[in-house]
Amino acid sequence: MWARSRLTVCTLVAAVLVLGLTSGLVFGQVLERSETLYSNGQQWGPVVGWNPYSSSMNNAMAIAQQDSARVIMFETPYLYNMLDGEVYPLLADGPFTWDNQRTYITFKLKAAAHWSDGTPLTAYDLAYTWDSNIKYSTNAGNNFKDYIDSIIPIDAQTVLVNAKLDANRKAINPLMVAAYLSGNYVIQKAWTQTLEARAGGDATKFLADTAEDVVYSGPYHKFFADDTKVVYVRDDNYWGQDASMWGKLPAPRYLAHTIFKDNAAGSVALAQGEVDVSQQFNSNIQVLWLNYGLPISTYLPGAPYGIGASLPTAYYNLKSPGLDQVAVRKAIAMAVDYPTIIANAMTNQSATFDQVPRSLMNPTPGEQALYDHDAVKDLQWAGNDAAGAKALLDAAGITDTDGDGWREYNGKKLSYVATCPNGWSDWQASIEVVAAAGKDIGIDITTNFPEWSVYQTVVTKSDAPLPAGYDILMMWSDGAGPTQPWGRIRHLLSSEFVGMANNWNGNWGQYSNPDVDALIQAIPAETDPATLKAAYTELVTIYLTDVPSFTLMYRPQNFHAVNESVWTGFPHQGDGTDPPVPPLNLTDGWSIAGLYNLTLVVP
Amino acid sequence: MKGYRRYFLNKALWFVVTLVCAFILNFILPRLMPGDPVAAIVTRMAVGMSNATGVQAIYQQYTELFGTNRPMLQQFFIYVNNVFHGDFGFSFSQYPREVADVIKSAIWWTICLQFPAIIVGWLIGNTLGALAAYLKKGFDKVLMPISIFVSNFPAFGMAVILMVVFGVTLKWFPTSGGYGFDRIPDFSWQFIWSVIVHYQLPFWSIVLIAIGGQAIGMRSMAIYELNADYVKYSRFMGIKDRKIIGYVFRNAMLPQVTGLALSIGTMVAGALVAEIIFSYPGLGYTMLNAVMGGDYPLISATTLIITLMVLIAMFLLDIIYGFIDPRIKATQLD
């Protein structure tokens, strides 16, 4: 009886195995490692949808309309290259041209460009995309409607972009008009009409549609997405393999992004070869190759390992008693130990202020060339200079009058709270260093770290003075882009944001200076390099003199570490690419050119 | 049987009263948190935007859409109406995903991780605790310190140790994910095997800690019962040891069963530490993000599920207790 049962069980197991083998049940579906490029650091939660009009799809790899737009699925007319500050044609055929008065732009589209459904990509698509952006109040529409009047197809291949004009018949902001072309997608007119029909003209439904049927022009599209990963597969009919663009298909068949829940898990996966391109902060990244001998590298071989693009900044609340005094603001900034911030908070993944003196510019050569370094040399401070800071305060008459060890201004003790969101560990470490600097010079600075949901609600309310507890606060600044450094300077200093109930733009310390506003107003229309340089130098001079805020470190546009166990040919400094491929995950702006340079370590 | 009906109705009434209170609190408490959830959404969406009025337009659009600009009472009645229609609305943090969809995709991972871990931890822990009480001597002397040590271990510490030892150093198990990083889910042996392998470290990181606590609790209860008068009396009566042990552990088990019911009731809250350390999919991390981001609909829905599960578990426990231990019913009805 027992023997018969065993025989039956064995037969059943064998039958299931045979069935499984013959039906592919045993092996299932595997992404071949030699065909897949794995990323991390971009997608931190499940993908919500595929609608390129909507900014709430949380589809980081596919949808990001920004200075260097992410172009694996949807494409822009031009690609911005943060390394040389130039834009290169993608859907466009050749450079765009302004008319003599700089009131409109014209450019051609590539004849080879077509959609994933095989239909040609035309100027009608581009014009309809703009009209839809306005009609449905998309981010792109809201962002550019003050600067672009209309986008009109001259013929199927020719596009006319009309700038909005001021009372003097001049473009309000030519910089922003041009920036639209490298930061915003072209979306198919026919599919947009399908979406409109589905939404029944309702803007909310239009933007909430998950667009699983979307037509795209880029080299990749959806293959799979769940709570743990998102995978994109190459479209082997991609138009870009035409000789007028890349001349071939990108190397990886799949782009995959595992969804990790914190940086630590992502770092372990990078070290184990489960991630090829890492766009997250990997603490002490150099340990991976120096101590463990792993084939991991960054864009630069040594510190700061990457190209700094943005300027995480400590803003002073200019309404706080005492912080309305330049001497107090500058003294605190002078006393801060920047090397400690860079070593601890950024594990040296930031250029030092000896390497790149502070200004309003990021460390890229293009921006650094925009101002006269010598003209502001005397305004610079080295940091960690408690003696200099004390002397400055003493000279301003801000001294300890009651002998309690803390300085007073107008009889009131200088006592502040420095703050940033809780859990933002690199920022918290920076703020602690700022607080320590205060104590060195007789200014009582304590720290407080509210949750982000609370912090941002308070900081972005610029129609009233900041409340108690927000004397020195840390926020970000713009990175690299076609409107930079103008956009960054505007966001750091323009008084147009003071008085806004919901201010996510900048100038959170509520600085106001008519001279600065005038320069910010004038720069976008200026074309003479010498005049531009003079304007930027003046802005840097004012910034370093008034010190309404100060840069704590330089931060890359994207972190970029690569594991060359499977793929090689990633962007590195001096890799011989021309134009140089920037270290932006091989997905953003001109960085996507890197996907065409990859080869397998073991072919 | 009449007494049971009264006991049952009494419990049912309290169940309903507690549920109503919990339902109201589930709605109100998240909304009392400081911070503006729509601001968080706008921050995410406004990245790269230069136009000040444009950003404000987005803010207004979403406050209108989510109804956060309406009075709280109005929001509550909308919420009640929607919940009775089985609609928890859109998740703020994962808009335009619906709350039901967010929960549906994460909850199975959580249940499949938590339920077996709770049961296995409970069974092993109680067995070890009972053995320690009964066998005493060497077994007890070894088990007790280990149990105290392990049960007091922080969950993240245990998870990190398991990951470093068995994942990074020995490479026996993968360090992250619910299944292979290079796999697409399908109904194949290899995928199932991949899920099983990825399951091990998160599972044992929960079980090992649970075992210690259960063992300590069971040991104390069993020692108390072993010294009870009825045990001594039974021995004098000449009843066999095996029979006596059966009585002892049934009585010692009662508080442990209450703990088990509570654990099962709260299990959908997720194993947050295991989820984070091993990047394991599940509801715990989703809930954490919902709380941090002020995602009211998602918080309300998940806490409502937890409330319901705890209440149902406790209600069933009360009913079962009424049957298995008439003293409890009698005390409650007095």
Image: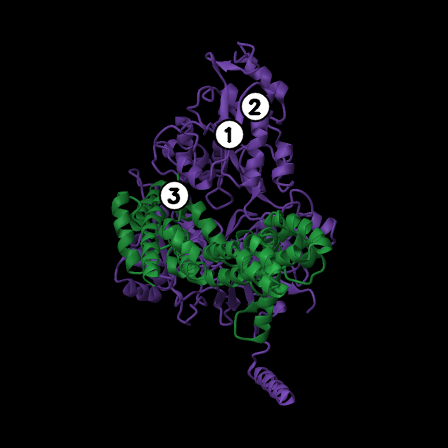
The secondary element bearing badge 1 is classed as strand
Residue A356 location, x and y as percent?
61, 35
Could you tell me which residue is drawn at 56 percent across and 29 percent down? A434
Respond whether the residues carrying marks 2 and 3 are from the same subunit: no
The secondary element bearing badge 3 is classed as helix
Return the mark for residue A418. 1
Could you tell me which residue is drawn at 51 percent across and 72 percent down? A236
Side of A396 relative to B15 (left or right): right
> What is the chain identity of the residue bearing mark 1?
A
Chain A drawn colour = purple
Labels 2 & 3 near each other (Cβ < 8 A): no
Residue A187 location, x and y as percent?
38, 61
| Residue type at the position of mark 1 | Ala
> What is the chain identity of the residue bearing mark 3?
B
* Mark 2, residue position: A438
- Give above or below for A52 relative to A429: below
